[in-house]
Image (cartoon, grey):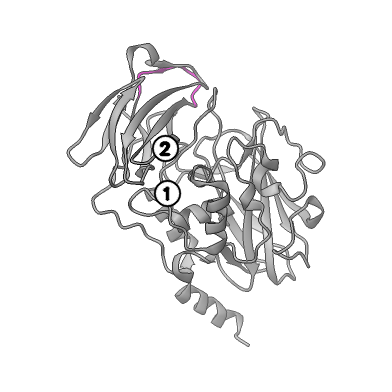
């Protein structure tokens, strides 16, 4: 049997660290959430990575397409579709109000009780092959939770009880509440790549084998709650991740040309959705959200369309296109002002060879 030190050294050499995973994903993913009348918060566990977060990481490519290699992530994409996976941070219930057991049904904890705007039902699948984070029982770990849209509230942290099997449906009776954190510290600004809440969590002692860490974010300024399921294994690890692209190789997207890095301005946030698609094209939308307490006076959003995609027409905005294909859409006169905690939506049609989602991050830039 390997000693704990040997195991850690083996894990470090064979597995991808979550720190590298976070940097890769946040620098390369396209953020996508639409269909809301009001701006909502956005967040999910990044350490340990939630199922939606790590499956997005496993699936992301440099073309705007999704191509997961993990079998559980592939099954989830096939069942719940691309829109849910591009909205990996939106496992939410707008009316949960801190309710858990007796409100969110057993077997549906990982999908916010199927009350999210998107279909996350596949992320409840009872499987043993989800991507996993390797941890040490009894150790203290640093939890990281995205603060893309920051709000006050509590984070309730649960861990599955000894004996729970990943091939069993997850219910409230399978969980122990091990920590509640109120308004934890933040690193990085909300609405920027890499920004997150963080706090220290003492992991339960005497544990080995597979488990789930379940976190419910209960906002204090809204009835909206977020839910995330993170698959872990207590085996002496130190945050390494397995089950991603090629059995542990770093799934770094390799774009053929540099991707834009939008500079998020103030409380402006832009998110993307494919509304309808057909052979050779699609209709898309971008929602511009104002998470601030004052009206937003003028806005612009920028993204690089997927390989083989060309935008043909835009409404509710004015578009310019750079030489590398990057597009910038600025407000029209009638939607220049976005109310506090409000949003406006632009639409477009595009020709496409199948890569309907952006390459890299879509975000607000100076108008």
In this picture, is 302 found above or below 157?
Answer: above
* Residue 255: quarter of image: bottom left
Category of crowding for the residue at label 1, using alpha-carbon neighbours closer than 10 angstroms: few (below 14), some (14–19), many (at least 20): some
Q: Is residue 121 magenta?
A: no
Q: Which SS does the magenta portion mostly show? A: loop
Does residue 54 appear to the left or right of 252 in the view shown?
A: right
Counting from the top left corner in percent of width and height, residue 61 is at 37, 54
Q: Which residues are magenta?
A: 291-299
Between disc 1 and disc 2, the foreground one is: 2
Q: Looking at the image, can residue 50 be seen?
A: no
Circle 2 SS class: strand
In this picture, is 186 found above or below 344?
Answer: below
Residue beneath the point at 47% across and 65% down: 17
Category of crowding for the residue at label 2, using alpha-carbon neighbours closer than 10 angstroms: few (below 14), some (14–19), many (at least 20): some
In this picture, is 144 found above or below 303?
Answer: below
Residue beneath the point at 53% across and 66% down: 243
Q: Looking at the image, can residue 342 be seen?
A: yes
Residue beneath the point at 76% across and 41% down: 100
- The residue to which callout 1 is attached is 26
Counting from the top left corner in percent of width and height, residue 360 is at 35, 46
- Outermost residue toward the bottom in this view: 1
Counting from the top left corner in percent of width and height, residue 106 is at 77, 48
Q: Nearer the viewer, residue 272 or 214?
A: 272
Counting from the top left corner in percent of width and height, residue 82 is at 49, 46
- The residue to which callout 2 is attached is 277
N-terminal label among 1 and 2: 1
User: How far apart in space, not on screen, are marks 1 and 2 (Cα)?
Assistant: 26 Å
């Amino acid at each position: 049997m390997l000693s704990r030190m040997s195991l850690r050294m083996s894990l470090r050499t064979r597995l991808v660290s979550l720190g590298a995973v976070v940097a890769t994903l946040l620098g390369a993913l396209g953020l996508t959430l639409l269909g809301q009348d009001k701006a909502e918060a956005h967040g999910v566990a990044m350490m340990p990575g939630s199922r939606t977060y790590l499956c997005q990481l496993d699936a992301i490519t440099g073309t705007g397409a999704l191509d997961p290699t993990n079998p559980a992530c592939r099954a989830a994409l096939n069942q719940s579709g691309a829109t849910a996976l591009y909205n990996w941070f939106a496992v939410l219930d707008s009316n949960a109000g801190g309710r858990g057991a007796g409100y969110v049904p057993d077997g549906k904890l990982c999908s916010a009780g199927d009350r999210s705007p998107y279909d996350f039902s596949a992320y409840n699948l009872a499987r043993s092959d989800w991507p996993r984070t390797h941890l040490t029982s009894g150790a203290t770990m640093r939890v990281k939770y995205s603060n893309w849209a920051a709000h006050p509230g509590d984070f309730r942290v649960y861990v599955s009880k000894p004996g729970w099997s990943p091939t069993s449906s997850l219910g409230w009776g399978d969980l122990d509440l091990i920590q509640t954190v109120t308004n934890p510290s933040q690193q990085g600004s909300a609405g920027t790549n890499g920004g997150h809440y963080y706090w220290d969590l003492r992991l339960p002692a005497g544990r080995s084998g597979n488990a789930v860490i379940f976190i419910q974010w209960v906002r204090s300024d809204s009835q909206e709650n977020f839910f995330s399921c993170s698959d872990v294994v207590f085996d002496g690890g130190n945050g390494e991740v397995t089950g991603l692209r090629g059995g542990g190789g770093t799934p770094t997207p390799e774009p053929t040309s540099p991707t834009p890095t939008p500079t998020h301005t103030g409380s402006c946030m832009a998110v993307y959705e494919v509304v309808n698609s057909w052979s050779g094209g699609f209709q898309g939308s971008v929602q511009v959200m104002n998470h601030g307490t004052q009206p937003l006076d003028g806005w612009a959003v920028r993204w690089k369309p997927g390989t083989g995609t060309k935008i043909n027409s835009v409404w509710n905005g004015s578009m310019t296109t750079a030489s590398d294909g990057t597009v910038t859409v600025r407000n029209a006169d009638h939607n220049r002002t976005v109310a506090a905690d409000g949003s406006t939506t632009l639409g477009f049609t595009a020709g496409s060879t199948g890569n309907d989602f952006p390459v890299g991050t879509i975000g607000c830039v100076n108008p």
